[in-house]
């Protein structure tokens, strides 16, 4: 089933905030084998000029996922999640994510395309801090294999 | 397939000079932008990916898609075996950059395409992901270096157009 093209441009406004915990950053860093003290030790982070331990660059996906799920699993969009693979990913960090951040995330449906027999969905995720300033912009393209043919 | 057999040729070739001067020689001291030249190589890195790491990453990231831990489900959807999370491969590629740059906050823009799955067999060895990076562009006015990465597993590239923009002193 093709994706509903009327979703392009639609904004899914943020739900409740994602609070970035120090132990979640440590857990994420440990899971990728990253022992950089700036991601584990508040003293090391402070010495490097940060107000909290710093998340690895791809940690943003952990914060974005719950917001993207609202779009991906919207039944009216028509995405067959059992056939979805991740096509591409980009993070633009306006500043680093640090422990203690209280983030919100608006999701914008950037594009819906058909390439061959695949449906492509591109989402833009705008993570903002408690002060309303931008933190990270994520771009994700999800590919539903064979659903367009 | 064993981890040893997946080591890509050339990843540990002699003559690769790590990019940049580290005047203090500490692990957290970033290379100076002024010391870099386009074409400089980052220190090559290799990361073993076992089933245990996939489970840990699933918990840490919240991505519990069973194709990343359940062989029955993975083969049921046509995959050869359990595969790594694409975002885990991306995270390991980023590690090669942040280990070099010193500060994870230095990476201000990072993008990849997921071109091939990383198959992780349950053989105690798993897969081996190798990352090489090259300084591809320097912007002294912006204080940034662009690093282009080649990320391989089992002898083939698994990420396309893997690029990081890194802010350096």
Image: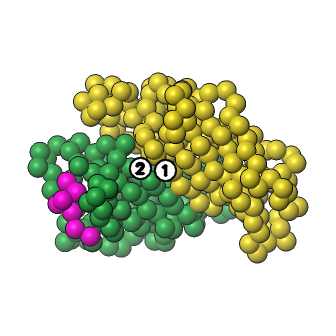
Chain colours: A yellow, B green
- Per the rendering, the mark at residue B108 is 2
Instruction: For mark 2, name the chain.
Output: B
Q: Is residue A90 above or below residue A145?
A: above
Q: Circle 2 sits in a helix, a strand or a loop, which is it?
A: strand
Q: Residue at x 33, y 69 (%)?
A: B136
Return the residue nearer the eye: B26 or A47.
Answer: A47
Residue A91 picture location, percent across and down: 51, 51
Would residue B38 appear left or right of A20 to someone viewing this image?
A: left
Q: Are marks 1 and 2 on the same chain?
A: no
Mark 1 and 2 residues: CB-CB less than 8 Å, in contact?
A: yes
Q: Is residue B20 left or right of residue B136?
A: left
Q: Residue furthest left?
A: B23
User: Split into 4 quadrants, where in the image is the N terminus of chain A?
Assistant: bottom right
Quarter of the image where the C terminus of chain A is located: bottom right
- How many numbered discs sit on the rendered protein? 2
Q: Secondary structure at mark 1?
A: strand
Residue occupying image coordinates x 24% and y 30%:
A47
Q: Quarter of the image holding residue A104?
A: top right
Q: What subunit carries mark 1?
A: A
Horizontal and vertical percent for residue A28?
Answer: 48, 37
Residue B10 at x, y percent in the picture:
32, 73
Q: Observer-nearest residue: B13 or B149? A: B149
Look at the image and give the residue range highlighted in magenta: B32-38
**Disc 2 residue crowd, few under 14, some 14–19, many 20+, Cα 10 Å:** some
**Tag of residue A103:** none
Q: Which residue is mark 1?
A: A92
Q: Relative to residue B100, is residue A58 drawn left or right?
A: right
């Amino acid at each position: 089933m093709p994706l509903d093209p009327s979703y392009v441009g639609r904004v899914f406004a943020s739900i409740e905030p994602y609070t970035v915990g120090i132990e979640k950053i440590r857990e994420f860093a440990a899971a990728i084998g990253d022992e950089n003290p700036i991601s584990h030790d508040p003293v090391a982070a402070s010495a490097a000029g940060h107000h909290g331990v710093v998340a690895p660059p791809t940690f943003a996906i952990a914060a974005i996922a719950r917001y993207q799920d609202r779009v991906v699993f919207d039944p009216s969009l028509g995405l067959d999640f059992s056939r979805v693979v991740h096509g591409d990913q980009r993070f633009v960090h306006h500043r680093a994510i640090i422990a203690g951040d209280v983030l919100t995330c608006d999701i914008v449906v950037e594009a819906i395309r058909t390439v061959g027999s695949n449906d492509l969905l591109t989402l833009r995720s705008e993570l903002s801090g408690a002060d309303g300033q931008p933190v990270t912009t994520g771009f994700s393209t999800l590919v539903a294999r064979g659903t367009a043919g | 397939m064993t981890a040893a057999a997946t080591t890509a040729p050339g990843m540990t070739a002699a003559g690769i000079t790590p990019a940049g001067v580290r005047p203090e020689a500490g692990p957290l001291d970033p290379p100076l932008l002024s010391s870099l030249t386009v074409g400089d190589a980052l220190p090559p890195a290799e990361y073993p990916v076992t089933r245990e790491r996939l489970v840990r990453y699933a918990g840490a990231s919240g991505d519990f898609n069973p194709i990343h831990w359940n062989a029955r489900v993975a083969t049921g959807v046509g995959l050869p075996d359990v595969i790594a999370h694409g975002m885990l491969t991306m995270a390991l590629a980023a590690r090669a950059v942040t280990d070099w740059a010193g500060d994870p906050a230095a990476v201000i823009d990072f993008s990849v395409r997921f071109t091939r799955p990383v198959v992780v067999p349950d053989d105690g060895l798993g897969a081996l992901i190798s990352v090489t990076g090259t300084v591809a562009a320097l912007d002294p006015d912006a204080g940034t270096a662009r690093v282009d990465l080649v990320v391989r597993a089992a002898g083939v590239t698994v990420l396309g157009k893997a690029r990081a923009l890194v802010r350096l002193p």
